[in-house]
Image (tube, rainbow, N blue to C red):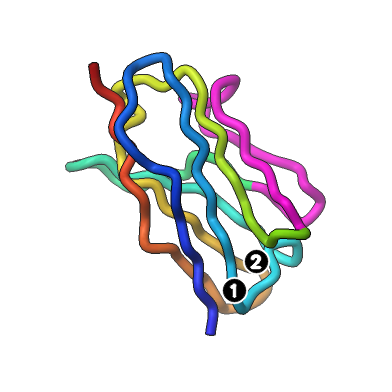
Amino acid sequence: QVRLVESGGGLVQPGESLRLSCAASGIIFSNNIVGWYRQAPGKERELVALIRMTQSTNYADSVKGRFTISRDNAKNTVYLQMNSLKPEDTAVYYCNVKSPYNSYNYWGQGTQVTVSS
């Protein structure tokens, strides 16, 4: 049974930081592609950041330079460090795990991030 558990969301003021965590059971993060997505009310789900098996990363232009995705293989956990948060970062953030050559595609339950003064 694959399970992804996200945590770390909350309410912060603009300019502050949060670190999101995605802990996995039943799947090995380092053998897959892991991404953080977000969805704001009335908006399409968008990719925020991803990390590959090689640890190479990609970021959406809107978060580049502010967000960092990382993986702790010993803990089988992926993080999203979010700095200099803006109100437009407000969304539900989801962890996703997939393989480009297998059929599985798993999602976490999401964690709410609200950036407001």
* Residue 1 magenta: no
Magenta segment range?
51-73
Looking at the image, is mark 1 or mark 2 earlier in the sequence? 1
Count of numbered marks: 2
The quadrant of the rendering that contains the C terminus is: top left
User: Relative to residue 105, is residue 73 drawn left or right?
Assistant: right
Which of pointers 1 and 2 indicates the residue nearer the eye? 1
- Residue found at x 56% / y 51%: 35
For residue 25, the mark is 1
User: Relative to residue 72, is residue 48 drawn left or right?
Assistant: left
Q: Which residue is at the front of the view, 28 or 100?
A: 28
For residue 22, above or below residue 47: below
Q: Marks 1 and 2, how far apart in space?
A: 20 Å
Q: Which residue is at the front of the view, 46 or 20?
A: 20
Mark 2 Cα-neighbour bin, 10 Å: few <14, some 14–19, many ≥20: few
Q: Position of residue 37 (x, y in %)?
A: 44, 47
Label 1 sits on a secondary structure element that is strand
Residue type of the residue flagged with mark 2: Pro
* Residue 60 magenta: yes
For residue 99, above or below residue 58: below
- Residue found at x 70% / y 59%: 75
Q: Which residue is mark 2?
A: 100
Q: Which residue is at the front of the view, 26 or 100?
A: 26
Residue type of the residue flagged with mark 1: Ser
Label 2 sits on a secondary structure element that is loop
